[in-house]
Amino acid sequence: MKDFEDAVQTESAKLNGIEIIITRNKKDFKNSGLTVLSPDEYINKLI
């Protein structure tokens, strides 16, 4: 991962059993190993 903050968020999520990242910048988390959703995609899944 190129961005330090994105890497911290990814590893924090994994360490805490979180499987989804919600972001407007999906391409930065492409290789994170997590499900990556935009805010709209996440809201649409809830409805």
Image: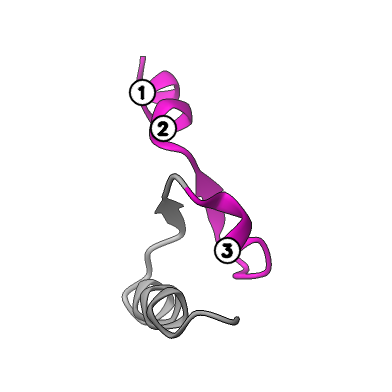
Numbered-mark total: 3
What residue is drawn where x is 44% and y is 44%?
24
Instruction: Give left or right: position of 36 versus 24.
Output: right
* Range of residues picked out in magenta: 25-47
The spot of residue 10 in percent (x, y) is 45, 74
Disc 2: which residue: 42
**Along the line of sight, which residue is nearer the eye, 9 or 4?**
4
Q: Do the residues labelled 1 and 2 touch (CB within 8 Å)?
A: yes
Residue 11 is a magenta residue: no
Q: Is residue 36 above or below residue 44?
A: below
**Along the line of sight, which residue is nearer the eye, 42 or 25?**
25
| Mark number displayed over residue 46 | 1
Q: What residue type is labelled 2?
A: Tyr
Q: What residue type is labelled 3?
A: Asp
Label 2: few (<14), some or many (≥20) within 10 Å? Answer: some
On the image, which quarter does residue 18 sit in? bottom left
Q: Are marks 3 and 1 in contact (CB under 8 Å)?
A: no
What residue is drawn where x is 34% and y is 79%?
12
**Callout in the foreground (2, 3):** 3
**Along the line of sight, which residue is nearer the eye, 16 or 3?**
3
Disc 3: which residue: 28
Regarding mark 1 in the picture, which secondary structure is present there? helix
The spot of residue 35 in percent (x, y) is 56, 53
